Image: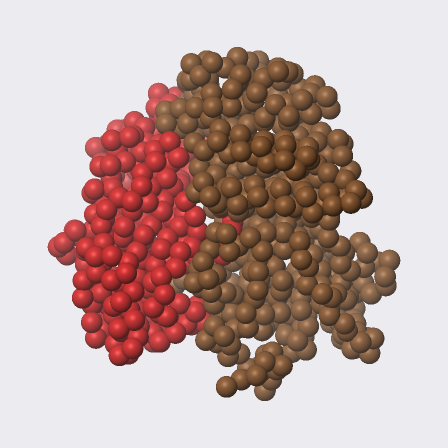
Amino acid sequence: MHLDPVPIVSNVRRAQIVAALKALVPDGVVEDRAGLRAFDGDALSAYRQAPLVCVLPRTKEQVAAVLAFASEEGVPIVPRGAGTSLSGGALPRGDGILLGLGRMNRILGLDIENRSVTVEPGVTNLAITRAVEGHGFYYAPDPSSQIACTIGGNIAENSGGLHCLKYGLTTNNLLAVTLVTMDGDVVELARDDGGYDLLGVVAGSEGLLGVVVEAKVRILRKAPATRTLMAAFQSIPAAGQCVADIIAAGIVPAAMEFMDRRCIEAVEAYCAPGYPRGAEGVLVIDADGVQSEVDDAMARIASIARACGAAVREATDEAERARLWAGRKAAFPAMGRLAPDMLCMDGTIPRRRLPEVLARMGGMADECGLGFCNVFHAGDGNLHPLIIFDAMKEGELERAETFGADILRLCVEVGGVLTGEHGVGVEKRDLMGEMFSDADLAQQQRLKCAFDASGLLNPGKVFPTLSACVEQGHMHVKGGRVPYPHLPRF
Amino acid sequence: MRAASEAEVVDIVRGAREHRRTLEILGGGTRRSFGRPTACDDTLDLSGLTGIVTYEPEELILTVKPGTPLDEIEALLAAKNQRLGFEPQDWRALLGSTGTPTIGGAICANADGPAAMRFGRARDHLLGFRAVNGFGEAYKAGGRVVKNVTGFDLPKLMCGAMGTLGPLTELTFRVFPKGPFKIFAAALSPDVLNKVAASPLEATALLHADGRAYVRLEGALAEKTAMLMRFGDFVEADALPGAVLPQPAAPEPPARARLTRAVKAAFDPLGLFNPGRLFEGL
């Protein structure tokens, strides 16, 4: 993929920026080369770029001061949580400040009675559940990186997880945020606060609209009963039919995960969860709720799966449940050990197109000669093709990226989308034109301009080319300076 | 002016733009007296933009034109034991209006019902849309799948915007299965609704009216009914209390109002659409 050239910043200018940041956040500036290396990228590991300087604020006032300073000085800002983005959402800029929010990691309040938790952005996803599980509650969105990823990053990316079909994405579980805009304004946004749903558009905005410095999320009562079954299929169309029939029967499983033959082989070799070798695909399905509801759903799911020709095994105890899920949860490491590098793709398709999409993907993989497998959030049509390669071998990274891009084009072609939960970031920004027309993208960019007319907040992400806001009908003048002074104006 | 297609909406908006004439965007007109009034040069009537574009029950996805009557959508979904999870409401009785409530109007006014507390408000169900902006351009946003984070989530902004961001020309929703349900009522005691909400009952309505608490339960009714009785002396009721109007948007603090104005300008820089309908001067 093409990355923007690194703009050059003079040593004098850098020293001025560092000094100013030290005045704003005295104990939180990282400027030495070794220290900055820790912040030089995220989980899209093929791309590395050290930031100009990194600042680690502890308070929202410090965040606001840093953004106001960057805005005045025209310095780009890249916000970062735990750096687990798979799309390069937190990839730093060589000419910009990396704003690390990991030190803002306090849980500010539990309101069990009203089922909400208020946290700072650096609190990890799992820490929210840990804070409330003693009361019988949990935080529903559960991206696989939940032990490390932060709620601030989850909001920026609108993270999903295994349980989205029933319990929604981050945006559906977010009640309020305090947002700092690029100008340094502090704005409170909440659900149902009247006016435009600005909270809704901040969720999933990939750090382009503002920096979340406080968030209030909804917690849910843990379901009294959960049961799990595995269904193994001899053909992909049979598995696809089973998924369609379960949905058509009005059942909303808590989770419904599909793995193809290549994935089954990889995880069996890795941790032996007991999926039948030789099967073309397995579904692992959870039903949760009150006991009689779960029993009823499980009986119906098993009967639908058998009618589709599946061999069905239901977990009889917690240990077996854990084993059935261990395979799914080990899919990434199991594939990861087969080659030095891995790309995890993330398209969504209409569920009924699964057999066709998997068949065509198999053809593409044969053509490009790289290993891959498919795991699929079957309930909501979210595909995660895992492509394995060796970046040290001439041309393999490019082949893997081309294969990945072809997969995403295929997702769009069958009526799906480029990304279901990982975000566009730098990884997919050049593919946005596959899904959106120029008019569609122009409207999104106008929204960006409404929040950040300077274009300094996380530039280079999401949009293939971020046109200057002045071209979108905005002219932002701050402190007497017009943005993009190099642009001729007429 | 009445539009029967997106192309006609584009033409009307371009004309309005050229002649700097403001447009009152109307569907069935049943919610016209809700919120702030608008005084416009012309009307843009979308009630002719009707019809189901696609309905895929196994995908839980529905795409419709904005002027489609709510009744028609409900009947279509009910035939497959499905529904819109935000339970859009007919406000004619509340507002003393006549006409046909449309899906576009329900989205613009955020006219959702009791199930929204369980499944989320309109904004949690609108997955994608097509619309025409104040530049006279047709565009789309979001997608036609349940799980999508590609680009900004513009569908959220359209819900409750009272048409001030422009006329919608197509709407895509996720839908939910619908099963048997029962409604219960009990004398309202402190915290009873909160306790039910915090229980595993997953109630699809929690309301109070006239000193009584109302709960609607769905799925596993025998077990859930028994659990509900632990919270109070509930007895079966025939119906939930009628819809209530949401509070119109209160004036915003300055920093927030600046963002609101900038967002409005991003969609409608000349202020053509429903001026004043959401906030004074917007």
Residue A479 horizontal side relative to residue B49, left or right: right
Q: Is residue A483 above or below residue B184?
A: below
Q: Nearer the viewer, residue A183 or A387?
A: A387
Q: Is residue B24 above or below residue A412?
A: below
Q: Nearer the viewer, residue A163 or A388?
A: A388
Residue B36 horizontal side relative to residue A218, left or right: left
Q: Percent position (x, y) of residue A195?
A: 39, 63
Q: Extreme front residue here?
A: A367
Q: Percent position (x, y) of residue A434?
A: 50, 52
Residue A68: tell me if it is visible: yes
Quarter in which the N terminus of chain A is drawn: bottom right
| Residue depicted at 31% across the width and 48% down the height | B112
Residue B119 horizontal side relative to residue B35, left or right: right
Q: Colour of chain A?
A: brown
| Residue depicted at 64% across the width and 27% down the height | A263
| Residue depicted at 59% across the width and 70% down the height | A455
Q: Colour of chain B?
A: red
Q: Nearer the viewer, residue A218 or A275?
A: A275
Q: Percent position (x, y) of residue B79?
A: 25, 31
Q: Percent position (x, y) of residue B248?
A: 32, 62
Residue A134: tell me if it is visible: no
The colour mode here is by chain
| Residue depicted at 74% across the width and 45% down the height | A395
Residue B195 horizontal side relative to residue B245, left or right: right
Q: Quadrant of residue A59?
A: bottom right
